[in-house]
């Protein structure tokens, strides 16, 4: 099927059909008798074909404009509006961390969970020292902490999300109270 030609037929014939419908809105397409030449029959068929195609596309367009949600969000999963304050959007990070990364020897001597969490924090560009006591406090909430950091950094504009930030800048105070 050549869609370009079909589109041209639709545009040309739709204008003709629109004029015909204005003159006689209840007229139905009439099939040509078989005894006539094939040319007149050929001109009647494309207009009926085009009308049916246009009708099908209109039905599709009408159906596609409707929005029906397929998933329902649980009430507990919605984040409360006061959880992330507006201050977080004006935070300025650093291009280099203030605290140096732990050496391989220090990492080797760390507990495995502590080391994995510390490395995950560094990967998210959290500026924290390897012997910071807050890491031990946050360790029991590590999955939630990392989700929170990713969520906060997604709200930063442009290159700011790739800067180094402290735990205070990433609004982690709520986790220290628990």
Image (tube, rainbow, N blue to C red):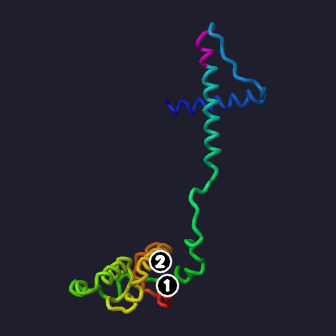
* SS state under label 1: loop
Residue at the location (63% across, 15% down)?
A: 40
| Cβ atoms at labels 1 and 2 below 8 Å apart | yes
Residue at the location (56% across, 59% down)?
A: 71
The rendered magenta stretch, by its main secondary structure, is classed as helix
Give the camera-side residue of 121 and 48: 121
| The label number, if any, that marks residue 148 in the structure image | 2
Magenta stretch? 36-42
Residue on which disc 1 sits: 171
Q: Alpha-carbon distance for marks 1 and 2?
A: 9 Å
Instruction: Name the quadrant containing residue 68.
Output: bottom right
Residue at the location (55% across, 71% down)?
A: 77
* Residue 39 belongs to the span the image colors magenta: yes
**In the rendering, at what x and y percent does residue 83 appear?**
56, 80
* SS state under label 2: helix
| The label number, if any, that marks residue 74 in the structure image | none
């Amino acid at each position: 099927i050549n869609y370009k030609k079909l589109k041209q037929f639709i545009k040309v014939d739709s204008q003709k059909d629109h004029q015909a419908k204005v003159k006689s809105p209840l007229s139905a397409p009439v099939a040509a008798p078989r005894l006539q030449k094939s040319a007149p029959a050929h001109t009647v068929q494309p207009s009926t074909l085009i009308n049916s195609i246009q009708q099908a596309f209109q039905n599709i367009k009408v159906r596609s404009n409707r929005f029906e949600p397929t998933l329902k969000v649980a009430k507990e999963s919605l984040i409360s509006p006061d959880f992330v304050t507006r201050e977080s959007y004006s935070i300025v990070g650093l291009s280099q961390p203030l605290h140096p990364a732990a050496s391989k020897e220090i990492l080797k001597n760390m507990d495995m969970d502590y080391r994995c969490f510390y490395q995950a924090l560094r990967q998210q560009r959290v500026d924290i020292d390897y012997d910071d006591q807050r890491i031990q406090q946050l360790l029991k909430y590590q999955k939630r902490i990392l989700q929170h950091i990713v969520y906060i950094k997604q709200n930063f504009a442009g290159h700011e999300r790739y800067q180094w930030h402290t735990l205070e800048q990433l609004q982690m105070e709520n986790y220290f109270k628990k």
